[in-house]
Amino acid sequence: VQKGVEVINGEVYRLSGLVEDLLDFSRMQSGRLQIRKEKVDILAELGEAYIMYQTEAEKKGLSLELIAPEQLPFVMADPARLKQVFINIIDNAIKYSTNNGGAVMIEASQSDVYVQVRISDMGVGIAAEDLSKVKEKFYKANNTVRGSGIGLAIADEIIKQHDGILLVDSKEGAGTTVTIVLPYVKPEPKTEIPEIEPVAETRKETENE
């Protein structure tokens, strides 16, 4: 009975994910994929996605690690869509990792203009002939793993709509690294307040004249 319930739960999770992917794919095709941008703490969304997948990683005997500074600049983004991208990439990294061993690394950093998130696994990797096609809709480099084949295409489209870039680097048998690059909101320059001469002093000088 317990095994049956686990199978049912797994299928419900798989099918609900497939339905969400197909809905987003339909919206993307018709230009109705909604993005509502606001100032977002990228570490908050990344941290939530990391926590969501800790148990899943442990089940496969994987180490899931998050390396990030205490804070990063805000980005203009749709928080729900941004977390959707992180979830998709982390989920793929765990799915394509071999059981009992290895690690999935999540690293966040910044440059002068961009915030960067790198998600790396030590899994099966992607063959060179498939690498240029992995962001295409419905393309799957490995058909032995569950999935619709459109999650990465949707993630790529979401990042493009945030004026960012999603890069995939992989080697067959050696793992995959997905890098998400987003422009951040530059802080407004501080305006110096001019010194104002005290009113009393000004009045006194006028009277003397």
Image: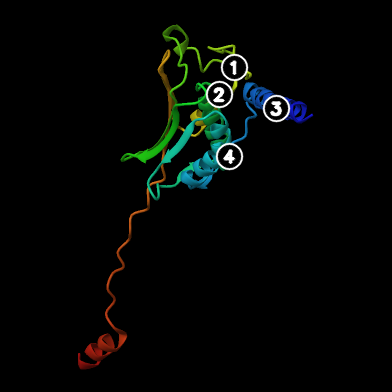
Circles 3 and 1, Cβ within 8 Å, touching? The answer is no
Disc on the earlier residue, 3 or 1: 3
Q: CA distance from mark 1 to mark 2?
A: 7 Å
Label placed on residue 52: 4
In the structure shown, which secondary structural element does the residue marked by tag 3 occupy?
Answer: helix
Q: CA distance from mark 2 to mark 3?
A: 13 Å
Disc on the earlier residue, 2 or 3: 3
Q: Residue at x 44, y 10 (%)?
A: 127
Disc on the earlier residue, 1 or 2: 2
Label placed on residue 10: 3
Tag 2: amino acid: Lys
**Within the image, what quadrant is residue 82 found in?**
top right
Q: Name the spot of residue 90 as percent of width and height, x first.
A: 52, 31
The N terminus appears in which quarter of the rendering? Answer: top right
Between 33 and 134, the one lying in front of the other is 134
Tag 1: amino acid: Val
Q: Residue at x 39, y 50 (%)?
A: 70
Q: CA distance from mark 3 to mark 1?
A: 13 Å
Q: Is residue 169 above or below residue 34?
A: above
Residue 157 visible to an observer of this rendering? no
Q: Is residue 21 left or right of residue 48?
A: right
Disc on the earlier residue, 4 or 1: 4
Label 2 belongs to which residue? 95
Tag 4: amino acid: Met
Q: CA distance from mark 4 to mark 1?
A: 20 Å
